[in-house]
Image (tube, helix red, strand yellow):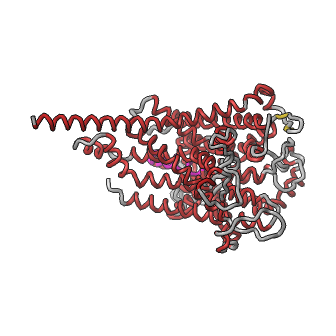
């Protein structure tokens, strides 16, 4: 009798424990599904809010550049063009700079502690909030580059990209500050993928008489290429969505211009500028622009993840 | 010429020298921005630091009046970041526990891990837009529109992927022997997780979470139309449901003011923000290196 009772008790305790276990498991399950819910929630909410504007302008929204709350006419071409141009051009500058820095950190030109210091300096740069970089850009960078822009316009004004008189904030400054923000991303990911290349490959290359840089260009960089590409795409996604620093320095003008020396707009800076005060169909148009931005960055991000999975190093 | 000696003028050696200097040049350019930014903030912001800065309200921009202090923004940043942490840490740690401990690598966990990466890539301003549509414009929170609470929710969306990822990765590093041992002496799954695996992975998870919080504290884009900005002291609990200032938004607003006094306040706020974020970053780096050296298992 006595023994049966303890057995029963044990069983009962076991049952409660089992239930708690189940509850715990399902709670964590629910919490992890919250990620998916939030993600789909964002996509759905932004899509439905932009529906009014979407049904009114259709895809014309993407190719017209009039943005006139008074006449209630909206087209986001200037902002989309600005987003693509600033992010792509900044990436074009960042890739060689970041990969070059990553090579510096992973090779042994200088003692290890110097390389480690450079590495952590670059990574700490990523910790500086973008609004602080924007403040710095307004008060330090813009005056510093002013003369240079005048020079650029004087001698390269025949190129459409430099065809306007520089006056204060412009797209080129936004590109420069984006380079500062992308540099840590490209550098740290390129460094990680360079570090993952097995030493055997390097030694084999040295063994058959290749010089250091022949080895880097023909063996190490190709082996690390997929990782570097993924890092570049992540940086592209970041560049397109980057808001504060760009908003503060790009000049925020909806007048379309090919020139980088005139004020411009990006989707995110348009959102930051106008969302607070917008009403009526302008809000819907802003949601439409946000939807475009989200699709752009989603496509880039998903492609980056696919690339990592497809071409991840298998040594 | 004896070809066994190093020949300076050989094209491969010249090329190597050239590329090496190019790479050194890249590295030099790469460290310049941090040095310049931090120096300017130390000089320009450090000069503005006074005791009044921490206690006064900012004066509304106008003529050349004294700009006041940043007390409401400072407290606001703490409050908003705390709200974001209260939401994001339990959800993120819980979700991470599921991914690392329960999931068996099936379609669902793959999908969630993919979703975490995608969510991490969502532009921060989109989080603001989402919360605006969900909370601010619907006035779902007791009829209040812009509020510190909404701002905290927007930030929590940005923190969530970081927390899940660090939990997931931290737990994966815990050796399976510990789990077997715990299950072997009769502990149930949740006891094992709460008493054995989580405490073992605590250091790495905490480091990642703290870095995530530091990152969120500097985010501006999600706050500018969810928490908006306020010039007034935060006095009580109900202030959570009204506009709330933050250091980041203060920097943004006051940097664009034409008045010198406000610009100086923006530099002072940057000083405080950057110093705290860099301190957290450097300390967690040292801490992580220390953990690496003293690893028990």
Residue nearest the observer in this picture, B43 or A232 = B43
Quadrant containing the C terminus of chain A in the rendered view: top left
B265 above or below B114? below
Residue nearest the observer in this picture, A177 or A14 = A14
A116 above or below B149? below
Question: Residue B224 placed where, x, y %?
Answer: 70, 50
Question: Residue A154 placed where, x, y %?
Answer: 90, 54
Q: Does the magenta stretch include residue B228?
A: no
Question: Residue A26 placed where, x, y %?
Answer: 41, 34
Q: How many labels does the image show?
A: 0
Instruction: State which quadrant residue B275 falls in.
Output: bottom right
Is residue B240 visible in the rendered image? The answer is yes
Question: Residue B214 placed where, x, y %?
Answer: 56, 56
Q: In the image, what residue occupies the spot 41% across and 55% down?
A: B203
Is B243 positioned to the left or the right of B153 in the image? right
Q: In the image, what residue occupies the spot 62% across and 58% down?
A: B76
Q: Is the magenta stretch mostly helix, strand or loop?
A: helix
Instruction: State which quadrant residue A80 falls in.
Output: top right
Q: Is residue A200 magenta?
A: yes
Residue nearest the observer in this picture, B189 or A238 = B189
Per the rendered image, the range of residues in magenta is: A185-202
Residue nearest the observer in this picture, B60 or A229 = B60
Instruction: State which quadrant residue A4 falls in.
Output: top left
Quadrant containing the N terminus of chain A in the rendered view: top left
Is B90 positioned to the left or the right of A289 in the image? left
Is residue A197 visible in the rendered image? The answer is no
């Amino acid at each position: 009798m006595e023994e049966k009772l303890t057995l029963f008790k044990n069983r009962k305790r076991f049952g409660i424990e089992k239930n708690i276990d189940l509850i715990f498991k399902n709670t964590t399950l629910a919490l992890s599904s919250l990620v998916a819910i939030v993600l789909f929630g964002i996509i759905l909410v932004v899509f439905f809010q932009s529906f009014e504007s979407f049904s009114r302008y259709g895809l014309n929204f993407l190719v017209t550049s009039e943005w006139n709350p008074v006449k209630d006419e909206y087209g986001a071409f200037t902002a989309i063009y600005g987003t693509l141009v600033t992010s792509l051009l900044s990436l074009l500058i960042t890739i060689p700079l970041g990969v070059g820095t990553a090579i510096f950190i992973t090779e042994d030109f200088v003692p290890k502690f110097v390389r480690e210091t450079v590495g952590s300096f670059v990574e700490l740069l990523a910790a500086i909030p973008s609004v602080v970089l924007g403040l710095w850009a307004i008060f330090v960078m813009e005056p510093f580059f002013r003369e240079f822009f005048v020079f650029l316009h004087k001698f390269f004004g025949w190129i459409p990209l430099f065809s306007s008189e520089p006056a204060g904030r412009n797209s080129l400054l936004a590109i420069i500050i984006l380079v500062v923000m992308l540099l840590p991303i490209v550098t740290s990911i390129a460094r990680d993928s360079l570090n993952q290349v097995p030493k055997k490959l390097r030694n084999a290359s040295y063994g058959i008489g290749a010089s250091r840089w022949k080895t880097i260009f023909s063996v190490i960089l190709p082996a690390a290429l997929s990782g570097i590409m993924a890092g570049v795409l992540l940086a592209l996604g970041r560049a397109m969505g980057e808001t504060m620093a760009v908003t503060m320095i790009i000049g925020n003008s909806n007048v379309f211009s090919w020139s980088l020396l005139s004020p411009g707009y990006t989707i995110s800076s348009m959102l930051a500028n106008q969302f607070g005060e917008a009403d009526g169909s302008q809000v819907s148009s802003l949601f439409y622009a946000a939807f475009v931005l989200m699709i752009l960055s989603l496509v880039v991000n998903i492609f980056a993840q696919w690339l990592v999975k497809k071409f991840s190093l298998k040594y | 010429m004896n070809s066994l000696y190093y020949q300076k003028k050989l094209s491969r050696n010249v090329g190597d020298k050239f590329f090496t200097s190019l790479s050194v040049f890249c590295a030099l350019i790469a460290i310049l921005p941090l040095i310049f930014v931090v120096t300017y903030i130390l000089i320009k912001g450090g000069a503005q630091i006074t005791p009044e800065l921490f206690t006064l309200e900012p004066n509304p921009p106008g003529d050349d009046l004294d700009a006041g202090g940043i007390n409401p923004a400072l407290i606001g940043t703490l409050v908003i970041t705390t709200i974001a942490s209260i939401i994001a840490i339990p959800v993120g740690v819980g979700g991470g526990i599921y991914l690392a401990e329960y999931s068996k690598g099936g379609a669902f966990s793959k999908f969630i891990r993919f979703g975490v990466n995608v969510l991490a890539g969502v532009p921060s301003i989109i989080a603001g837009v989402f919360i605006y549509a969900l909370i601010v414009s619907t006035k779902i929170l007791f009829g209040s529109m812009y509020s510190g609470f909404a701002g905290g929710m927007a930030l929590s969306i940005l923190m969530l992927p970081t927390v899940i990822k660090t939990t997931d990765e931290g737990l994966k590093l815990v050796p399976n022997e510990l789990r077997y041992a715990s299950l072997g002496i009769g502990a149930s799954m949740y006891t094992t997780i709460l008493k054995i695996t989580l405490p073992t992975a605590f250091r790495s998870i905490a480091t990642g979470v703290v870095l995530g919080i530091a990152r969120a504290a500097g985010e501006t884009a999600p706050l500018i139309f969810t928490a908006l900005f306020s010039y007034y002291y935060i006095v009580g609990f109900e202030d959570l449901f009204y506009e709330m200032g933050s250091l980041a938004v203060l920097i943004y607003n006051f940097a664009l003011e034409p008045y010198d006094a406000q610009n100086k306040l923006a530099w002072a706020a940057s000083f405080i923000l950057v110093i705290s974020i860099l301190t957290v970053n450097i300390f967690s780096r040292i801490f992580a290196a220390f953990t690496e050296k003293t690893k028990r298992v």
